[in-house]
């Protein structure tokens, strides 16, 4: 039953007709209390009552059809969406991160009266989606009204970021709203989504979000629901305004990376060459995407000794050529490229200079000197690079470049240098 939908439509029609509730009661012969109950979603009208209301409001044919459809939903069943992607069978590790998400989403510690929002932020390829989907499957029993999922394409190599209005249309249809009743504008769709989820307990997974503005219209409207968001962006806007809890995801520990590799190629193979397995994951920078690519390569060559795989990867120049696939969605270079393409020209130039720093961490002063810019400008560029997930910060406030990000940036710097030479 969707009394609230009918009530909203009736109230909007009355207001467009510039009628008070008392005026509509007088014009239709329906009691003011009955009209009040309908508008508050407490009841639906009988066919004869509906006809009297529509005649009094002077509705056109389209408006009459919409009200009639809303009033007819007396037996509509509750739709329970199950949109989560499959859980990864070879998921390993992340014990501490899973425990932290449990803590952040515990109803006993969540702020009362508000939708819980947990954002998982981190660099490309670090396993944000895999973690979010795994946790959501694990927690699904806590949310009996279902799970919604959408890839927001915030950092997609081939497509533009998903328009929030399009995502809302998919959510509303999944919740049982007929296409004819879905408003055309994003703001109205967002309001209807909040209304439809106000009394539900749902998990809403917003994957690969570009920024806070893209995520905000997609948040459910119930304190019993939970939004889990993944993004390379730090989503500071959601943290500041909506009170989102942000989990900053790091690379695997060496043990986690070796366990994950063994899950893909078999434990006996890793036990036979433990030192080579450890070196392989180190060459991958402990980055889950890189380990997955190497695991796929080794899976296709089951007789190849791991020591030979180490030698080949060490000898590969540029290094990222050894971590490529025929699918850009799981290609390390392509993943970094999607983050790089979000930068403005000045920040991109700054990044190409930053990767020339020889150490694993760099101070703001050193970064400014490398790029020959003022400190104020350097700070702005560093904030943008952090927001894009291309660098992070350590406990001392220094800026950290992952080894594979540095390798990617070095390729860009070399290509830019070649272009400059050609122009001279």
Image (tube, rainbow, N blue to C red):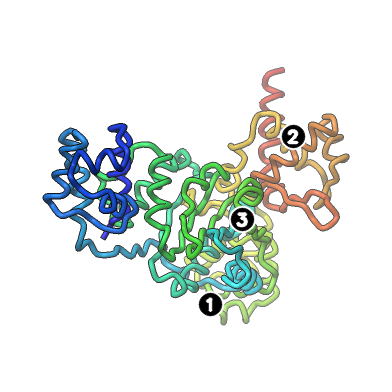
Closer to the N terminus: mark 2 or mark 3? 3
Q: In what element is the residue under mark 3?
A: loop
Which sits earlier in the primary sequence, circle 3 or circle 1? 3
The quarter of the picture where residue 42 lies is: bottom left
Height in image: 352 above or below 259?
above
Q: Label 3 crowding class (10 Å Cα cut-off): few <14, some 14-19, many 20+? A: many
Q: Name the residue under label 1.
A: 266
**Residue at the image position 34 percent from the left and 53 percent from the top:** 40
Say few, some or many: other residues with alpha carbon within 10 Å of mark 2 (under 14 / 14 to 19 / 20 or more).
many
Q: Do the residues labelled 2 and 1 touch (CB within 8 Å)?
A: no
- State the CA–CA distance, disc 2 to disc 1: 43 Å
Percent across and percent down for residue 82 are 36, 64
Quadrant for the N terminus, please: bottom left
The numbered mark at residue 244 is: 3
Q: Label 3, label 1: how many angstroms apart (C-alpha)?
A: 39 Å
Disc 2 to disc 3, C-alpha distance: 30 Å
Whether residue 89 is visible to the viewer of this picture, yes or no, is no
Residue on which disc 2 sits: 350
Residue at position x 50%, y 44% in the image = 156
Left or right: 397 with respect to 10? right
Query: Can you say whether 188 is above or below 420 in the image?
Result: below
Q: Position of residue 368 (x, y in %)?
A: 84, 35
């Amino acid at each position: 039953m969707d009394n609230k939908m009918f009530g909203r439509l009736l109230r909007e029609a009355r207001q467009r007709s510039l009628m008070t509730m008392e005026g509509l009661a007088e014009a239709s012969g329906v009691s003011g209390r009955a009209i009040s109950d309908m508008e508050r979603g407490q009841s639906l009208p009988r066919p004869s009552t509906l006809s009297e209301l529509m005649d009094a409001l002077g509705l056109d044919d389209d408006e009459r059809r919409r009200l009639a459809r809303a009033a007819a939903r007396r037996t509509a069943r509750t739709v329970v969406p199950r949109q989560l992607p499959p859980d990864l069978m070879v998921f390993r590790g992340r014990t501490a991160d899973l425990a932290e998400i449990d803590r952040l989403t515990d109803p006993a510690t969540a702020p009362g009266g508000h939708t819980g929002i947990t954002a998982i932020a981190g660099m490309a390829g670090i396993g944000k989606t895999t973690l979010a989907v795994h946790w959501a499957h694990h927690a699904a029993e806590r949310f009996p009204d279902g799970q919604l999922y959408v890839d927001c394409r915030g950092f997609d190599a081939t497509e533009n970021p998903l328009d929030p209005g399009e995502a809302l249309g998919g959510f509303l249809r999944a919740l049982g709203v007929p296409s004819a009743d879905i408003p055309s504008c994003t703001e109205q769709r967002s309001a209807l989504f909040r209304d439809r989820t106000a009394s539900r307990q749902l998990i809403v997974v917003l994957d690969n979000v570009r920024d806070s503005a893209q995520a905000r219209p997609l948040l459910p409207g119930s304190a019993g629901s939970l939004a889990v968001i993944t993004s390379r962006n730090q989503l500071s806007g959601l943290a500041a305004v909506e009170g989102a809890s942000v989990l900053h995801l790091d690379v695997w520990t060496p043990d986690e990376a070796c366990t994950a590799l063994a899950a893909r190629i078999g434990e006996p193979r890793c036990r036979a060459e433990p030192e080579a397995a450890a070196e392989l994951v180190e060459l991958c920078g402990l980055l889950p995407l890189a380990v997955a690519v190497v695991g796929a390569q080794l899976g296709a060559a089951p007789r190849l000794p791991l020591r030979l795989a180490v030698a080949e990867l060490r000898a590969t120049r540029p290094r990222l050529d050894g971590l490529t696939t025929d699918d850009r969605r799981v290609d390390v270079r392509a993943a970094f490229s999607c983050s790089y393409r979000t930068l403005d020209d000045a920040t991109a130039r700054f990044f190409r200079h930053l990767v020339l720093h020889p150490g694993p961490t760099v101070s703001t002063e050193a970064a400014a000197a490398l790029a020959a810019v003022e400190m104020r400008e350097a700070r702005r560029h560093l904030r943008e690079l952090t927001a894009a997930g291309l660098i992070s910060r350590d406990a001392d406030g220094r800026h950290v470049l992952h080894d594979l990000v540095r390798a990617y940036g070095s390729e860009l710097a070399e290509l830019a240098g070649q272009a400059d030479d050609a122009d001279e």
